Image (spheres, rainbow, N blue to C red):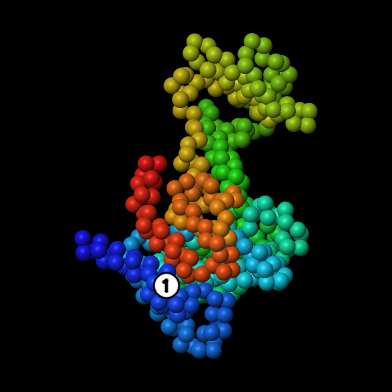
């Protein structure tokens, strides 16, 4: 009980500071994110140490309650930020980058282990080509900047992962991303996940396809041969399988399997794979003709039940986001409440916080407020997760 009362008192104290009820307006400006923070520190070196000390005190109070393990951000509002200030669109994205750097520091100081950011959607490729090029150039520049600071990242134990269909990226960006992942692969203190060329629908389709391929490779046929993508392995070209030769295959491919169920695959006018299925006395007989080879397989009712099936765990294992737990908080700036095809699979039990601030304006206080709301609803959210 004393611990509970201390926790509640701490939360009230943080709430009063955040809302300014204690009259510490100077504290809000000192702790909050400003675009001039670096210049302030340069002008007065004690400023950086002082604000760091205040944040440490604040996070110490907040650590009495549960700290989220994973926070995800939809970085919305860079273009509007630039438009309101009559700046080029590229300047808005650069301002968003500096906001990201500040928020990453706050998250890791608070003890958040995973941070995911939605940097570039597959749908963003539909934007004007010059803007897409600006974003790709900025992405490549910042990734190479991370590589230049790899010693700092390794010292801090930060692992960087790029999540998405990376094949859609230009080669320089993709190579830089792969190098950054390799350089930080052994770090385990914290993980930064950057979603580029990503949508949830693409992620789900990818996971289902990979699961199906994996299950196909598990199917075994008699004599230890393996079926992969409809091809029987372990037989020489033109060889016999169960006494059937290539000539017999062509004959089988040319008939219609009268009275039996048959399926076939045609490519460039040539039948590449034919399968017929016949039931006799409760036994299923499969005859598969594939790439001029024939295999005949008999299955009893018992054996049929052993055919591997794709399960939920198989799909989740092949998700791009399988490297991290589901997010505890999802923050989208600009007051928007749409998920925009982001982490749809992973966010079923995740609260969405939508501050009105544009992404470059997002600061410490919006982050603190999101975590306080998470702490307030933690018991309810955990209960929902267990029910799911």
Q: Residue at x 62, y 71 (%)?
A: 95
Assign a secondary structure to mark 1: loop
Residue 151, relative to residue 353: is it above or below? Answer: below
User: Is residue 7 rendered to the left or right of residue 374?
Assistant: left
Which residue in the rendered view is the most extreme toward the right?
Answer: 269
Above or below, 367 relative to 264: below
The quarter of the rendered structure image containing the C terminus is top left
Q: Please tell me which residue is depicted at 45% across the width and 80% down the height of the picture.
A: 26
Residue 164 location (% of width, % of height): 60, 53
Q: Residue drawn at (50%, 15%), measured in percent from left and top?
A: 283
Q: Residues within 10 Å of mark 1 (few under 14, many from 20)?
A: some
Q: Quadrant of residue 333?
A: bottom right
Residue 228 locus on image (x, y percent): 59, 36
Q: Nearer the viewer, residue 82 or 215?
A: 82
Q: Is residue 188 visible?
A: no
Residue 132 versus residue 270 in the image, above or below: below
- Could you tell me which residue is drawn at 54 percent across and 89 percent down? 43
The quarter of the rendered structure image containing the N terminus is bottom left
In front here: 21 or 266?
Answer: 21
Residue 201 image offset from top left, x and y in percent: 60, 45
The answer to whether residue 13 of the structure is visible from this angle is yes
Count of residue discs: 1
Q: Which residue is mark 1?
A: 20
């Amino acid at each position: 009980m004393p611990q509970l009362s201390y926790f509640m008192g701490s939360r009230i104290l943080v709430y009063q500071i955040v809302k300014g009820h204690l009259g510490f307006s100077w504290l809000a400006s000192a702790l909050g994110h400003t675009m001039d923070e670096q210049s302030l520190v340069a002008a007065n070196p004690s400023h950086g140490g002082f604000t760091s000390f205040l944040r440490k005190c604040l996070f110490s109070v907040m650590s009495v309650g549960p700290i989220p393990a994973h926070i995800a951000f939809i970085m919305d509002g860079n273009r509007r930020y630039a438009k309101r200030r009559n700046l080029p669109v590229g300047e808005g994205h650069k301002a968003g980058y500096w906001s990201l750097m500040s928020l990453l520091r706050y998250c890791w100081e608070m003890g958040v282990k995973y941070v995911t950011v939605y940097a570039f959607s597959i749908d963003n490729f539909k934007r004007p080509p010059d803007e897409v090029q600006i974003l790709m150039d900025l992405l490549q520049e910042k990734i190479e900047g991370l590589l230049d600071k790899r010693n700092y990242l390794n010292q801090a134990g930060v692992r960087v992962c790029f999540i998405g269909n990376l094949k859609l990226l230009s080669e320089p960006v993709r190579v830089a991303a792969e190098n950054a992942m390799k350089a930080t692969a052994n770090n385990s203190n914290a993980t930064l996940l950057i979603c580029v060329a990503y949508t949830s629908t693409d992620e789900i389709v990818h996971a289902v396809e990979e699961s199906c391929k994996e299950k196909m490779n598990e199917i075994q046929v008699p004599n230890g041969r393996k079926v992969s993508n409809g091809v029987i392995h372990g037989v020489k070209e033109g060889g016999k399988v169960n006494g059937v030769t290539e000539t017999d295959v062509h004959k089988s491919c040319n008939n219609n399997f009268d009275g039996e169920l048959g399926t076939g695959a045609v490519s460039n006018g040539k039948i590449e794979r034919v399968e017929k299925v016949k039931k006799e006395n409760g036994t299923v007989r499969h005859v598969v003709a594939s790439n001029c080879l024939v295999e005949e397989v008999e299955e009893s009712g018992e054996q049929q039940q052993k055919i591997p099936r794709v399960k939920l765990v198989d799909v989740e294992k092949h998700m791009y986001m399988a490297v991290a737990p589901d997010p505890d908080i999802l923050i989208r700036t600009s007051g928007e409440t749409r998920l925009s095809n982001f982490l749809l699979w992973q966010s079923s039990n995740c609260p969405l916080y939508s501050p009105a601030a544009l992404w470059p304006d997002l600061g410490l206080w919006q982050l603190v407020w999101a975590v306080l709301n998470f702490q307030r609803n933690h018991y309810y959210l955990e209960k929902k997760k267990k029910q799911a």
